[in-house]
Amino acid sequence: MQNLHKLLANNKAYKIIVAILLISIVLQLGLLITNLIKGKQEVQVDANVTTVKGVSKDLENTEEKNVKKCEDEKISSNLFTFLLQQVIPYQKDPVDYGVVDAIKDLTQIDISDPKILISSQIPIMDSYEVDDVEITEEEEEEIYNLTSSKPLNDGAVAVNNTGDKPLVLLYATHTTESYASSSKTKINYVSYARSLDERYNMVAVCQEIKKVLEDKYGVQVVLDTTIHDHPDYNSSYSNSLETIKKNLQKYPSIKYVFDIHRDGLAENQKNKEVYATAVNGVNSTRVMMVVGLNHQNSANNAKFSDQVYGTFNEMYPSLTRPSVKRSKAKYNQFVSDNAVLFEIGSNLSTLEEAKVSASHLGDVLGKVITEKETN
C-alpha cells in the first residue's frame, strides 16, 4: 500500500485529476453559498399588491430569476458530473458534456470557434486567423492580372455601371460566422455563433453593403454567397480564393475585392464593449480593417485601407477601430490593389447592430470608390 501511494504521488495524471476534483468541489461550494445568499436577498411578492398587472409583473420577474438560477445550477451540475467521471470512469448516468463544454464554463472561451480561441490571447496562438493558402509569387501575379487594375481594351468602367461590368466583389471567407441572438432575432446556429442560414450569417451583412453601394452610389456589386468555412474551417481561405478567381475570370471589370467577417471574442462584459457603439442614437457595432502584408501587392492594399479609414473617421468616427496589419498573412489580398478584410462587430454583437454598421460601411466605400473612379 505504501508503494502504491508513492507511485500515485509521483504520477502527474493523478495529481491533475485530484486538482480537477478539488476545483469542482470549490465550485459546488461557491454555488451553494451563492444560492444561500440569493435566497435571503430575493424579494417576496407583496401580498398587498392590488392590481393584477402588478402581481403578474412580480411573478414574471420571480420566474425569470428561477429560470436563470436553474440554468446556472444545470451548468455547474454538468461540470461537476463530467469532472467526477474523469476520476471515477465507471460511474453511471453519463452526462452529454465534454471537455469543450467544461473549458467554456470555466473560462468563457469556446475553443470550437478558432477565431475566439485565437483572440483569447492563448500563448500558443501567434496569428490572427488561419491563412492556409500556399501560393507562389508567379501564381499571385497571374490572379492579380485577371482584374482591371490595369486599363481594359474597351475603355474605363463608369461608376454608375451596369450588371455586365461590376466594380466590386463581396464575399465572406468565414461565411457561417454569425452574431448573438436578440429579442428581435433568434438565430439558428450550426455551432457556436455560426449559422448556415443566409438570413443570419455574413451573407446578410454583405447584402446591406451591396444595397447601399448600388442604390445610393450606382456601383454594381457581385455578391458571392458560397460557403467557404463549413465543414472544413481550416480550408476557408483556399476555398475563398477559388471563389475570387472564378469571379475575376467572369467579371474582369472588378477592381475592389472585399472579404466580410465578424470578430471572435471570449464572452465577458469588457469584450462586449470593444465593438459596442451607437450612431445617432442607434445601437451599432464598430468596424475594423485587417490587411495582410505578406505579398507583393501589400503596399497598395495598405494605402487603400488607410484611405477608407480616413473617410470612415470623417463620416462615422464612432464606428472605426484601429486597422490591423499582419506581416505574415496574405488573406488573398494579392488579387487586387483594393482588397481589404472587414471585421464588422463580433460574436457578442447582435445581427441588427451589424446590419446598421454594414450600411454605414457601404456608404463609406461608396464615397471612396466614387472619388477614385472619377478623379
Image (tube, rainbow, N blue to C red):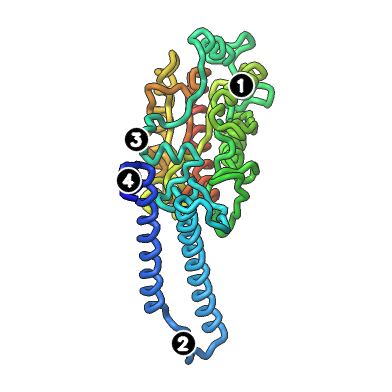
Of the image marks 4 and 2, the number of the one nearer the N terminus:
4
What is the secondary structure assignment of the residue under circle 1? Answer: helix
Q: In this rendering, is residue 77 above or below 58?
A: above
N-terminal-most mark, 3 or 1: 3
Callout 2: helix, strand or loop?
loop
**Amino acid type, residue under disc 4 in the picture:** Asn
**What separation in Å lies between label 3 and label 1 (alpha carbons)?**
32 Å
Picture quadrant where residue 12 is located: top left
The reply to whether callout 2 and callout 1 are in contact (CB within 8 Å) is no
- In the image, which is nearer the foreground, mark 3 or mark 1? 3
**Residue at numbered disc 1:** 242
Residue 115 image position (x, y, % from top left): 46, 37
What residue is disc 2 on? 46
The amino acid marked with disc number 3 is Pro
- In this view, the residue in front, 64 or 125, is 125
Name which residue type carries label 2.
Asp
Name the residue nearer the viewer: 287 or 227.
227
Q: Could you tell me the amino acid type at mark 1?
A: Glu
Front residue of 101/262: it is: 101
Question: Residue at point 61% right, 29% down?
Answer: 221
| N-term-proximal mark, 2 vs 3 | 2
Q: Which residue is mark 4?
A: 3
- Percent x, y of residue 268: 40, 52
Residue to which mark 3 is pinned: 123
